[in-house]
Every structure is written in C-alpha cells, then in structure tokens.
Image (tube, grey):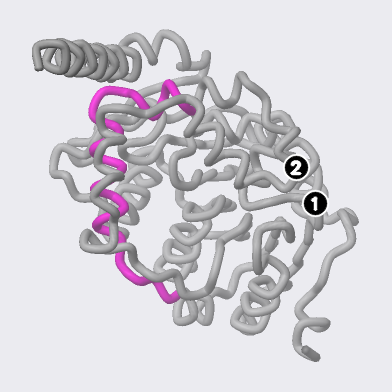
Amino acid sequence: MRLLIKTLAVILALLLTGVVAALWTYRDIPAPTLETRYAGPASKFINIDGVRIHFSDEGTGPPIVLVHGDFESLIDWEPWVQALGDHHRILRFDLAAHGLTGPDPDGDYSPARTLALLERLVDALGLRSFVLAGNTSGARLAVHYTAAHPERVQKLILLNPGAVVAMSHGPEQLPRAIRVLQYILPRALVAAVMRRGFGDPARLDAGRVERWHELWRREGQRAAALERLAQRSTDDLAPALGRIRAPVLLLCGEAAGDGAAQAQQYLQLLGAAGPVRTIGYPGLGHMALEEAGTAIGADVRAWLDGKPASPGMDAATAAGI
C-alpha cells in the first residue's frame, strides 16, 4: 500500500509539474513586449470608443481599407501593401482582440459592435470615399459596411468570404474543452489549424506560425477570442449583397471546400452591383491571403488599374448556371 501511495504521489507530482510547466510555457505575453516585437514603422494606436486600436496608415493616392479575418492581424496584409502601396494610401488595422489591438473593455464582440468600430475608425481618420477589401470574416464585415454606406465605397474586394449564410456558434455550441485554450495553447495546435487552411500545407513557414502563436497569446486575447465566437450570430449576407452597387472583385481559393460553388452564389446575388469580376485559385485554401498573398495582390493591382488579371468567371457566366 505504501508503495502504491508513493507511486501515485510521484505520478501526481509529475502531472502537476507538467501542468505548471505548460501554464508557464503558454502564458500570456505582455502587450508592450509584443508591440516592441511586431509594431512596424507605420504602426499607430488610436482610441475608438474605449478600444485601443492598432493601425497602419501609409502611402499616398486613392485610399484602400483592408479588413482582416478571424485570428489574423494587419501584418498578414503585407504582400498587398507591397503590391499596392506605391499608388494608394493603405489603411489596415487589427480588429478588437486581434494582433496588437487588445480586448474590448465592454466585452462586446458582436457583429454590430465590430461594424460600429469600423465605421468610427474610418470617420476618425477622415476617410470619406475609398476602396474596401476584406478577407474571410473580414470580407463579410466589408459586405455589411458597403451595404450600409454605399456612397462611401468606390469598389469592393472580397477574398474567401465563405458561405452566404454563416451559422452561429452560440455559447452552447462551443465545446467546454475549448476553454482550456485560455490557459494552454500549444504552438503545434496553431500550426495544425493553419495547415488546414492552406491548399498546400508545405507553403506554411515556421516564422508565420510563430507570429500567430505569439499574437494569440497577447494578454487577454484568448479569452476575448472565445467570447467573440460565443457572441457570433447567424449571418445571412443575401440582403446586404443585393444592396451593393459598387464594382466587386471576388477572389476565391477553390481548394477551400465549396469555394467555387460559393462564388457562383455570390455572383448571382450581386446582380445589382457594378461590374463583378471573380478570380478562382484552384490550388489555394481558406487562408489564401497567407498562402499566396503576393500573387493575389498582383491580381488586385491589375483589377484596380483596369488591366487583365488571372482568368476568372464573370457575372454573365454565372447567370447561365
């Protein structure tokens, strides 16, 4: 019996040591540390309705606003900045509880709140008319903004916006086990999630994984991310798409599940918009921006300049489907 007790004590001690080590290894990283590490030369911070938003405003020319998706940061837009920055003023920013922007003090991560922060940010920076581009969930936000403010969006660029109807998670649908990610977030898990978003996982480099892993661990960020998921409601883009009148560029990674079929749905619902151009990328996944941002940025540049880009499918083709 004594041997059994001693053995159990050793096992428990090892488990406790492992837990403590994991908590220490994957602990929150202080915001100043990450700002020193990841803020760029053009980085600035602005207080919008209590949220300290990290943004970058650089270049001259017609303005473009870039809206990233879930778990991303403004850094992921860097290839587009390189492709467009010599002819455009580019505003990119970190959404609440993303990148170097901390949690919302109100704890409100609803779509309505996120849209309101975007509205107030562009107002604060004096942007009255601009091109708006969004990636994944950021593309959905861009659709809602354009539908609400058609007079301000000159052109709309959507990269992998997902299904027209995105179902909510809801707090009751989030597995309880996921809450442990507030405390323990292995780098290997981040890498696995990212690989699933790539059409070719071999394109995922270690430096990108390291940056994502560290930014996810900004103090307060993980708990806020779970709150965002819990507060997300079912989002049907069909009504908003029907109100868009601006020219649209729709970019789809066709290796991302139903990417090609979803593109057809968008084209049909964008019937009242200006000219709609779609470019499909057969080898790219949901994280096409991270996977081939430079190539996609070149296509965006060509479209904005009125030049031919990669072959795609236009609205007339979709109408016959």
In the rendered structure, does residue 318 fall within the stretch colored magenta?
A: no
In the rendered structure, does residue 217 fall within the stretch colored magenta?
A: yes
**Residue under the image location 16 percent in, 17 percent down:** 4
Check the picture and name the quadrant holding the N terminus: top left
Relative horizontal placement of residue 231, taking residue 92 as reference (left or right): left
x then y, percent, for residue 274: 67, 74
x then y, percent, for residue 100: 37, 25
Residue annotated with mark 1: 283
**Do we see residue 257 in this rendering?**
yes
**Residue under the image location 68 percent in, 46 percent down:** 288
**Looking at the picture, does residue 175 appear above or below residue 106?**
below
Q: Secondary structure at mark 2?
A: loop
Q: Label 2, label 1: how many angstroms apart (C-alpha)? A: 7 Å
Q: Nearer the viewer, mark 2 or mark 1?
A: 2
Q: State the image quarter where residue 223 is shown.
A: top left
**Residue under the image location 38 percent in, 40 percent down:** 95
**Looking at the picture, does residue 62 appear above or below residue 2?**
below
Q: How many marks?
A: 2
Q: Nearer the viewer, residue 22 or 227?
A: 22
Q: Do residues under tags 2 and 1 come within 8 Å of each other at their CB atoms?
A: yes
For the residue carrying disc 2, how many other residues have a C-alpha within 10 Å: few (<14), some (14-19), or many (20+)? some
**Residue under the image location 25 percent in, 42 percent down:** 179
Q: Secondary structure at mark 1?
A: loop
Which portion, as a residue range, is magenta? 212-236
Relative horizontal placement of residue 95, taking residue 187 as reference (left or right): left
Disc 2 residue type (three-letter): Asp
Q: State the image quarter where residue 82 is shown.
A: top right
Check the picture and name the quadrant holding the C terminus: bottom right
- The mark that comes first in sequence, 2 or 1, is 2
Residue annotated with mark 2: 200
For the residue carrying disc 1, how many other residues have a C-alpha within 10 Å: few (<14), some (14-19), or many (20+)? some
